[in-house]
Image (cartoon, rainbow, N blue to C red):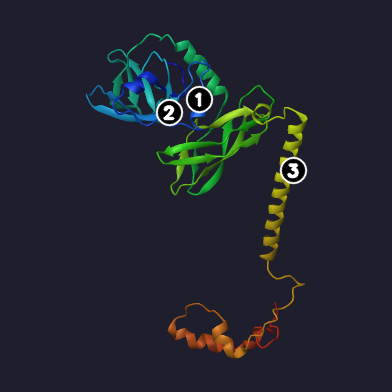
Amino acid sequence: DSCADVSLISLEYYKSLVNPPTIKKGIKMNLWQLTDKDSKIKGYVAIPIFTMSEQNELIETEVEVYLVPLMSVPILLGEDYQLNYELMVKWNVDTRMMILYRDNPKYSIKAMAVDKTEDFGRLRASVKAIQIHLALAIKDVQLLPQTSKLVEVTLPTGDKSQWVVERNLIPNSPSSYLLVPNTLVKAKESTTVYVTNPTDTPRILQKGDVIGTVHKATDYFDKPVNEDQKVEMEKTTLSLKNLVNEQTTRQEEVLTDKGGPKTADLPDPKLYPSSQLQELLDVGELPIHLEEKTWSMLTKHIKAFSFDGRLGDYLAKA
């Protein structure tokens, strides 16, 4: 047990594969950074894992692994694999130690003891460094199609700094992602960040899923190196602030226009003749047997409408 949250694959072993999958890079790859400066992760790939059960059945699973150069083992399966497939370890006198998928004896694998590898200590150190700077989902969350939802995540403890949860793309299939925006949060054990599901299919975030990397706000944002740069940054900030205020004002004006007629509004100056009642009123699609009765009723109460230049006048008490 390497205590790794994530699954890793040796870069050298990856290159030896006959048809290796395409290496993916970008935002998600930057989530993972080993403390050893000479062992930076080169990307990530999704690969199948084949294991032979005690019943001589071939079990195929899939895992997303991160490529690390100079590993002394070909593949290291982390806690993510264990949680996704609900691996359980059982031991008894007769069968010794077994690994089961979802506690199902049909899918059992004989466990074998192995010695620690030379890079075990480095992996332990890197895992600790990784876990400190990750925002992880605290509980399972369902994201409905085309919606955003606040997801509760963990934050680094023991530090009273403000934090930035960095924007991220969370893969949920080879061609679709969940979206996480940059979020500035206060220092505490947990907080909430918005996660968006832009797809047409409901998605599930599981407890422990990585939502994004966490950075100290003081280290994340740009700082001016001289007075001239400070002035330029202040100008840019002011321009953005004015732009936001202008857009907010426009939105408020639109909402006011859509709020309905006000008491100070003048009546429509256009003249609508009562002789064109049937052309001007939209009553929808009426059944044929109701058309005559409907128009007869509307004609009878013609004064309730503002035809012929008059205001509507309906004699009734509320």
Quadrant holding the N terminus: top left
* Relative depth, front residue between 111 and 259: 259
How many discs appear? 3
Report the side of 183 relative to 288 (left or right).
right
Mark nearest the camera among 3 and 1 is 3
Image position, residue 244 (x, y; %): 69, 48
Gap between marks 3 and 2, in whole Å?
Answer: 40 Å
Residue 251 placement: quadrant: bottom right
Q: Position of residue 217 (x, y in %)?
A: 67, 30
Q: Are marks 3 and 1 in contact (CB under 8 Å)?
A: no
* Label 3 element class: helix
What separation in Å lies between label 3 and label 1 (alpha carbons)? 35 Å
- The residue at 45%/24% (across/down) is 42
Mark 3, residues whose alpha carbon is within 10 Å: few (<14), some, or many (≥20)?
few
Q: Amino acid at mark 3?
A: Leu
The residue labelled by disc 2 is: 44
- Given residues 252 and 186, the one toward you in this image is 252
Q: Are marks 1 and 2 in contact (CB under 8 Å)?
A: yes
Where residue 228 appears, as percent x and y from the top left, is 76, 32
